[in-house]
Amino acid sequence: MRASAHREAAQEAVTTDGHRVEVVANIGGLDDAEQGLANGAEGVGLLRSEYLFLQRADAPSEEMQAEAYAGIARAVGTDRPLVIRTLDVGGDKPLGYLPMPAEDNPFLGVRGIRLGLARPDILRTQLRAILRAAPVTRLCIMFPMIATLGELRRCKAMVEEERARLGMPPVRIGIMVEVPSAAILAEQFAREADFFSIGTNDLTQYTLAMDRNHPALGNEADALDPAVLHLIRQTVDAAHRHGKWVGVCGGLASDPLAVPLLIGLGVDELSVSVPSIPQIKALVRRHAKSECEALATEVLSLGTAAEVRTRLTKAVKD
Ligand code: PEP
Ligand code: MG
């Protein structure tokens, strides 16, 4: 990156009417973290911890995980957030050392937190390894695929037990909002979670009942569908009523077309792919929040994803 581009990427993303949006990175390991920070990321909004678990003959030990998380935490530093998502695998991403029964519908089966709760030995080991990074960074622990409040409560109890055992400081505990039930009950979740991060990839697949990897449906599963956007609005409003922040870490946050819409919907944090960071920050700086809010209100009245795309394309041109 040229020096001037580097200087620009390092600046905060503030709209023309003075509203700050945090732009952070989606990462899969230390290299991504370093690259993301060099690109101007203001922290990490999603560490997909799967990378430590895949392509191995056995589960990674607490020690090995702790070393990996601490390395990333040191790179991120004490002033920036690091959101670590617990293991999100399942029938669609099987692990050799974790035999699971075959499932007819792996996306509706034992994946994400369901696997963690079915195998608390694995989840607790991971939680201890993550918690050991708490003194080094602004640590946030995030649980994937939360569908019920009962799941969140069980997860929080586990964090609390392991934290007390290790004598670590309190950490923020949040959830991915990527199952429609979590968005529908956002009001109740917002009372008990410290933050939300909306996973638009899965939220779209589950809202539209379209497999995100399906060769014939993948392109139809559009996160700009008004049904998904209404769930985002509802989630943001509920979180803000309870003084909690909301990010978007699904692919929609990295889509330049969606940036003014997400600002208008009130999203506080955009967690985007490492290469997209400078562009997304630059886009935030180009818009006024008040105009984005008017745009979001208009878009929420539309009926199809195609109509939303047409309206957002016009907004970019104007
Ligand atoms: C999502 O579902 O939007 C998300 C960010 O999680 P993943 O893509 O890892 O399922
Ligand atoms: Mg997901």
Image: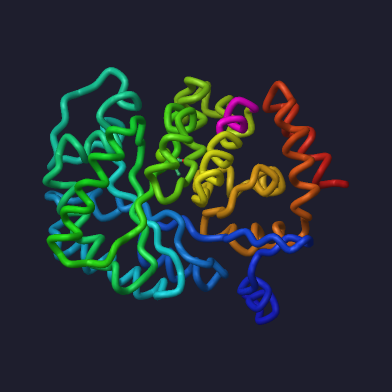
Query: Image quadrant of residue 283?
Result: bottom right
Quadrant observed for ligand 2 in the rendered image: top left
- Residue that appears at 41% across and 71% down: 76
Kindly give the residue lying farthest to the right in the view shown: 318
- Residue 47 in the image: state x and y as whole percent: 38, 56
Given residues 261 and 190, the one toward you in this image is 190
Can residue 214 be seen here? The reply is no
- Residue that appears at 69% across and 43% down: 261
Is residue 100 on the magenta stretch? no
Residue span colored magenta? 226-231
Given residues 89 and 175, the one toward you in this image is 175
Q: How many marks?
A: 0
Chosen colour scheme: rainbow
- Residue 142 in the image: state x and y as whole percent: 36, 49
* The N terminus - image quarter: bottom right
- Residue 284 in the image: state x and y as whole percent: 70, 58
Side (left or right) of 316 relative to 187: right
Q: Is residue 176 above or below residue 3?
A: above
Side (left or right) of 15 relative to 231: right
- Residue that appears at 41% across and 38% down: 189
Can residue 112 be seen here? The reply is yes
Q: Is residue 187 above or below residue 126?
A: above
Given residues 215 and 303, the one toward you in this image is 303
**Principal SS element in the magenta part?**
helix
